[in-house]
Image (cartoon, rainbow, N blue to C red):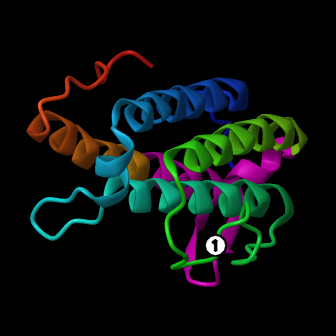
Amino acid sequence: MEQQTPVIFAEQLLVHWQGHRSLTRRIIEAFPEEQLLNYSIGGMRPFAAMAIELIRLASLGITGMHTGVWDAYDSPHIEKDAPVPSKEVILQLWDALTEKINTIWPQIRPERFREIDKAFGMYEGAVSDLMLYWVDNENHHRGQAYVYLRSLGIEPPPFWDR
C-alpha cells in the first residue's frame, strides 16, 4: 500500500473538536434558562434537548473510539428520552464530558483512527470519520441554536471564535 502523508494529527483533531465544543458551550450559556429548555421554532426541539443529544453522542462516541464498545448506556447520568435537566446540569455534564474526552483521547491507539468499526451497531466507517460526523452533527444543531438566539433578540457568540 502506498505511504500516505497525514493531513491532520490526532492532537490537532482533538483541539479542533474541543474548539467546536467550547463554542457550543458558550451558545448554551447565552440562552436564558426558560428558552433553553422550552423554546422552539418550526417543530424543532428546544436546544436543551439537542445539547443532551450532543452530550450522549460524544460520551458514547469517545468510549467507542477508545474501546470499540459502543454501549448505548454509557452516558453521563442521562437516559435516552429522559426529561431535560436544568441549564446548570447541562453545563456540568458538558464540562464533565470535556474532561472525559481529554482523558480518553491520548489513550486511543493511533491506528484506531483508521480502523473500520460499526458505531452503535449501525453506522459503519473509519473511526475518525465517525468522529467527524459528531462534529458535523454538533455544527448542525449549533446552527439551529443561532437561529433560536437571534429570533429571541440575543446576539450569539461569533461562529469563528473557537
Pick the quarter of the image with the C terminus: top left
Q: Is 68 located above or below residue 30 in the figure?
A: below
Image quarter for residue 82?
A: bottom right
Secondary element type, mark 1: strand
**Camera-nearest residue between 32 and 107:** 32
Left or right, residue 17 beside residue 155: right
Image quarter for residue 122?
A: bottom right
- On the image, the x and y values in percent for residue 43 come to 15, 71
Q: Residue at x 63, y 35 (%)?
A: 4
State how many labels appear. 1
**Camera-nearest residue between 151 and 113:** 151
Amino acid type, label 1 = Ala
- On the image, the x and y values in percent for residue 87 come to 50, 46
Q: Residue at x 75, y 76 (%)?
A: 71
Circle 1 sits on which residue? Answer: 119
Q: Residue at x 21, y 65 (%)?
A: 44
